[in-house]
Image (cartoon, coloured by chain):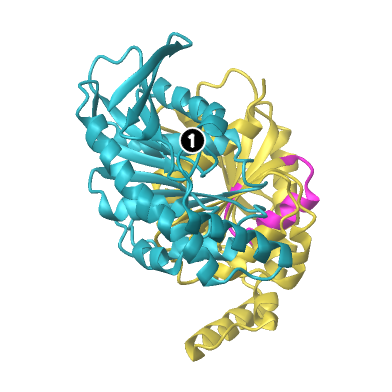
Chain colours: A cyan, B yellow
Amino acid sequence: MHFTSEQRLDDAVCERTFTLGEIPGILWTPASASAPAPLILLGHPPLGLGRMYPRLAARAQHCAAEGFATATIELPGSGDRPRWPAAERARADLRRAMEAGGPLSDEIIDALILPLVDKAVPEWQAALDALLSLPDLGGPVGYSGGVISIGTRLAVVEPRISAAVLFAGSFVPRAVFEEARQVTIPLHVLLQWDDEGNDRQAALDLFDAFGSKEKSLHANMGGHTGIPQSAGDAAGRFLTRHLKRG
Amino acid sequence: MHFTSEQRLDDAVCERTFTLGEIPGILWTPASASAPAPLILLGHPPLGLGRMYPRLAARAQHCAAEGFATATIELPGSGDRPRWPAAERARADLRRAMEAGGPLSDEIIDALILPLVDKAVPEWQAALDALLSLPDLGGPVGYSGGVISIGTRLAVVEPRISAAVLFAGSFVPRAVFEEARQVTIPLHVLLQWDDEGNDRQAALDLFDAFGSKEKSLHANMGGHTGIPQSAGDAAGRFLTRHLKRG
């Protein structure tokens, strides 16, 4: 992990960009932290860190005010990272199927999402290894947002993650749906009720499938990016409740 | 409205019992209030105020700590109030249908709930008239909990109610389902995901039907009375956001 830049946001947050091998990432730490800060991994949709930066930085500043460090990495095939031919084909198949207006087949969703999950999850784990070796970061670790299939797989395979906020809103392969039953950590699931790009019933079924004893679903009106401030605040309180020590 | 007793709870809350005609009720006001307090009507299931008192008093104390007055009245046919024969028959029909294990017919649900809603809603409105004439109570008014069909009808017909917390968990007649489309006030709906006495899909359909632009659904694990503390706190924050002036 090599830090490539450092700046202050509003004097309250230290923002450092880094690379982890070929993967770019960003780390935000509260400028005033006196002890190692608990860490929240900020998930995001595969639109590229550059495009997502304003929303990610706003979430990071909000988290820093609560004493959390936050970090994110570029997803495979997004931003400046190399595309791979199968992903391009899967995206073209998805576009054709959506233009045709029919339901999306399991095959299209599997081809689109599974390789992304398979590639991304070990990268987030490697990022976690590197991040937790820094002196200003400690546990526990939370995950928040992004592609729900990545968050689900991470919640199953990564024991250092002790609570997660998941955003319903992406296609979920059958294999990941089955993995959801193995999740045991506390979950706070956000659902935008009128999200045109999201199958509401599939999101409710996935929520039902999660194995966690403590899970809650929070549905709000509006489209994919219309999560109200109060719902964001409630998700923040969930993470604070589960990740703050003592 | 005649006050029949007065006591302090923990020095912080003044609890007064009253009768409104033949209807018993309870009013809780913050002992320290300097200005007229906003009021939350505390709904409850038709189990009798006596049986519900511990839960209602706890909610009242919680609300008083946030500066709210709260009030509740006995439901028609509950507690010491007279039963009516049609309600007894409807309850017997419900028991038989549930013992038979089949789905409940619309006729059974209508016979059970509609007369209760028709009788209770004008009583809550009369209570509101009396309560708001007291010098220590002011607007705005919220409604929280209880039989969701009563809360839905009240939200439609009573313009003084400006926000409501509704608990999914009772049978909803078709007529009330249609009324839900006319609700426009902000709603915060709680759903216990594993509530055996509640049809989850019907609750989701009702949430979808509410006409309010601002509505949110909060589903938590557990049975009918297992609402976690954090979910109760979030409902309280919703009411504070909508009812606190200035």
Front residue (pair B7, A64): A64
Residues in magenta, as a range: B144-161
Residue A38: image quadrant is top left
Tell whether position B156 is magenta.
yes
Q: In this view, does A53 lie to the left or right of B228?
A: right
Q: Tell me what residue is drawn at x 34 percent, y 62 percent.
A: A211
Q: Can residue B69 be seen in this view?
A: no
Q: Tell me what residue is drawn at x 40 percent, y 34 percent.
A: A72
Tell whether position B32 is magenta.
no
Q: What chain is tagged by disc 1? A: A
Q: Is residue B214 left or right of residue B67?
A: right
Residue B194: image quadrant is bottom left
Residue B94 percent location from the top left of the image:
57, 82
Front residue (pair A160, B216): A160
Front residue (pair A41, B199): A41
> For the view shown, which residue lies furthest in the front direction?
A85
Front residue (pair A227, B189): A227
Mark 1 = which residue? A80
Quadrant of image for the C terminus of chain B: top right
Q: In this view, does B107 lie above or below A85?
A: below
Q: In this view, does B45 lie to the left or right of B224?
A: right
Residue B113 percent location from the top left of the image:
66, 70
> For the view shown, which residue lies furthest in the top direction?
A11
Instruction: Give the amino acid at mark 1.
Output: Asp
Q: Tell me what residue is drawn at x 26 percent, y 54 percent.
A: A157
* Label 1: how many Cα within 10 Å (few below 14, some 14–19, many 20+): some
Residue A180 percent location from the top left of the image:
37, 62
Quadrant of image for the N terminus of chain B: top right
